[in-house]
Image: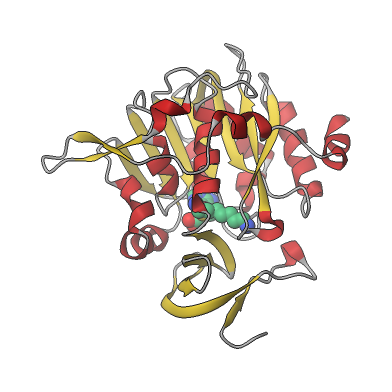
């Protein structure tokens, strides 16, 4: 591979590899779960890599974090208790904090090194932890959700890595069943659900498992993220039995989302301005439109 360049190689996208010219490697470590690398790139800013796979870049993280958070949270009224699985960089926490109704944010990330590295090298994401409403748990999300008190959450957001390595069970039916239990009636999930260009077989399995477990609605949506394989990534948006959720028609206006919550010096919550960069109501509605090949494959499962 080219010297001075990082190439993202994985059996999940054979025969192709997106490459980024490296300015400087700023961190290299090995946690109990994965290899952790941070580098500064020539054209995408700072990049976080786990086991050779890009998790985020400064340039386009907004597209992923804003969509994975606001697609579910703008689809329900007044979310109060939210759980994040994965997401140890803090970016999704930052986005959830825009919703003033949220009282409690639990996050369960398996790898403490991701949190520590984010706090050191990605302050504009890790600021999501600077919110008195956030409770951080370092543990496997599978066990955490299984052991959660029934009926607890309005929303669960699964910001997980790909289904090779520690995240594999986050894509399987027993985990979906635990989420259904942990949600209140009419509660919602949004999970990282890969790309239709590369992973239609995985998406079909996830959609089939969700149709069996979620008795409300089951939808696939997607967003552009140029630094992710194929340049797009999808999400599963599902609701449990109870008050119906129409994910395609958001009920929260993005005008209310241009502030985030952090701590003041005394440790109480304070609101500070931080405009959205990617999410708006048009992008929300558009996210559920699928290309014909994907529609066809998901129709008769
Ligand atoms: N917001 C950045 C995008 C990510 S991060 C995925 C996170 O999920 C990582 O921090 C990883 O340590 C964590 N994780 C993996 N498995 C588990 C688990 N079982 N329980 C809790 N956390 C877990 C996703 C990028 C998607 C890349 C697409 N190619």
The reply to whether residue 113 is visible in this rendering is yes
Check the image and name the residue furthest to the left.
Answer: 266
As rendered, which of 75 and 117 lies closer to the eye?
75
- Percent x, y for residue 5? 59, 80
As rendered, which of 170 and 36 lies closer to the eye?
36
Location of residue 163 (image quadrant): bottom right
User: Is residue 296 positioned above or below 184 on the image?
Assistant: below
- Percent x, y for residue 94? 38, 43
Q: Is residue 226 left or right of residue 115?
A: right
Query: What residue is rendered at 68% in x and 36% in y?
Result: 221
Location of residue 162 (image quadrant): bottom right
As rendered, which of 248 and 44 lies closer to the eye?
44
Query: What residue is rendered at 44% in x and 24% in y?
Result: 152
Query: What residue is rendered at 47% in x and 44% in y?
Result: 277
User: Is residue 89 positioned above or below 205 on the image?
Assistant: below
The reply to whether residue 146 is visible in this rendering is no
Check the image and name the residue furthest to the top.
Answer: 243
- Percent x, y for residue 87? 46, 49
Q: Is residue 85 left or right of residue 2?
A: left
Q: In which quarter of the image is the N terminus?
A: bottom right
Q: In which quarter of the image is the C terminus?
A: top right
User: Is residue 208 positioned above or below 3 on the image?
Assistant: above
The mark tally for this picture is: 0
Q: Is residue 112 left or right of residue 290?
A: left
User: Is residue 199 positioned above or below 296 on the image?
Assistant: below
- Percent x, y for residue 20? 59, 73
Q: Which colour scheme is used?
A: secondary structure
């Amino acid at each position: 591979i080219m010297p001075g360049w990082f190439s993202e190689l994985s059996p999940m996208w054979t025969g192709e590899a997106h490459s980024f010219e490296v300015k400087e490697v700023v961190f290299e470590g090995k946690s109990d779960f994965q290899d952790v690398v941070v580098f500064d790139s020539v054209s995408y800013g700072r990049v976080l890599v786990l086991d050779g796979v890009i998790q985020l870049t400064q340039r386009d993280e907004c597209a992923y974090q804003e969509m994975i958070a606001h697609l579910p949270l703008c689809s329900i009224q007044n979310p109060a208790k939210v759980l994040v699985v994965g997401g140890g960089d803090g970016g999704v926490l930052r986005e959830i904090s825009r919703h003033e109704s949220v009282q409690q944010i639990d996050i369960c990330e398996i790898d403490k090194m991701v949190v520590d590295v984010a706090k050191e090298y990605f302050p504009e994401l890790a600021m999501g932890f600077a919110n008195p409403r956030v409770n951080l748990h370092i543990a496997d999300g599978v066990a955490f959700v299984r052991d959660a008190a029934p009926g607890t959450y309005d929303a669960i957001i699964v910001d997980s890595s790909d289904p090779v390595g520690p995240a594999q069970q986050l894509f399987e039916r027993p985990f979906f069943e635990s989420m259904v239990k942990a949600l209140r009636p009419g509660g919602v999930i949004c999970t990282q659900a890969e790309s239709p260009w590369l992973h239609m077989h995985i998406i079909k399995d996830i959609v089939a498992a969700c149709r069996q477990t979620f008795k409300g609605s089951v939808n696939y949506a997607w967003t552009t993220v140029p630094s992710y394989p194929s340049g797009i990534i999808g999400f599963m948006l599902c609701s449990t039995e109870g008050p119906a959720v129409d994910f395609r028609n958001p009920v929260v206006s993005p005008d209310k989302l241009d502030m985030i919550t952090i701590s003041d010096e005394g440790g109480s919550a304070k609101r500070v301005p931080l405009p959205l960069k990617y999410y708006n109501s048009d992008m929300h509605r558009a996210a559920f439109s699928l290309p014909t090949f994907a529609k066809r494959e998901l129709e008769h499962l």
